[in-house]
Image (cartoon, grey):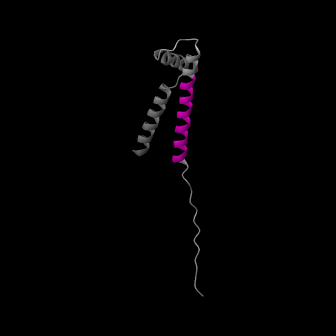
Amino acid sequence: MRPHSLLLVASLCALLAGCQTMTPEERRAADETTCASYGFRRGTDAMARCMLDIELDRRAEGRSMQSRADAMMWRPMVIERRVIVERR
């Protein structure tokens, strides 16, 4: 029963990941809407800066998530070599 549970969880994750995918155009429109809700007007430097800040935050979050995933996958490996010391 365990393999079926893992398959179900994997399927649900894949389904949810597919729902969250946005095209670059959709992402830009969402960012414009967000910045407009903050009071910035289209075509201004302030709007461009707001959209840039959102994109930079998104990239930083992606790097942070990747770093955490890497840390979980690749834990430091400790190699031990025992040395036996005998008195003579």
The vertical placement of 87 against 52, above or below, is: below
Q: Within the magenta stretch, is there residue 67? A: yes
Residue 7, given in percent of the width and then of the height, sits at 45, 39
Q: Examine the rendering and report whether any part of residue 23 can be seen.
A: no
| Residue at the bottom extreme of this rendering | 88
User: What residue is rendered at 55% in x and 25% in y?
Assistant: 53
Residue 25, given in percent of the width and then of the height, sits at 57, 17
User: What residue is rendered at 46% in x and 29% in y?
Assistant: 16
Quadrant position of residue 85:
bottom right
Q: Quadrant of the N terminus?
A: top left
Q: Front-most of 50 and 30?
A: 50
Residue 38, given in percent of the width and then of the height, sits at 47, 17
Q: Front-most of 30 and 84?
A: 30
Asked whether, in this view, residue 36 is left or right of residue 87, the answer is left
Residue 43, given in percent of the width and then of the height, sits at 58, 11
Q: Quadrant of the C terminus?
A: bottom right
Tally of marks? 0
Numbered range of the magenta stretch: 52-72
Q: Main secondary structure of the magenta part?
A: helix
Q: Examine the rendering and report whether any part of residue 46 can be seen.
A: yes
User: What residue is rendered at 52% in x and 19% in y?
Assistant: 31
User: What residue is rendered at 57% in x and 21% in y?
Assistant: 49
| Residue at the left extreme of this rendering | 1
Q: Within the magenta stretch, is there residue 27? A: no
Q: Front-most of 88 and 13?
A: 88
Q: Front-most of 72 and 15?
A: 72
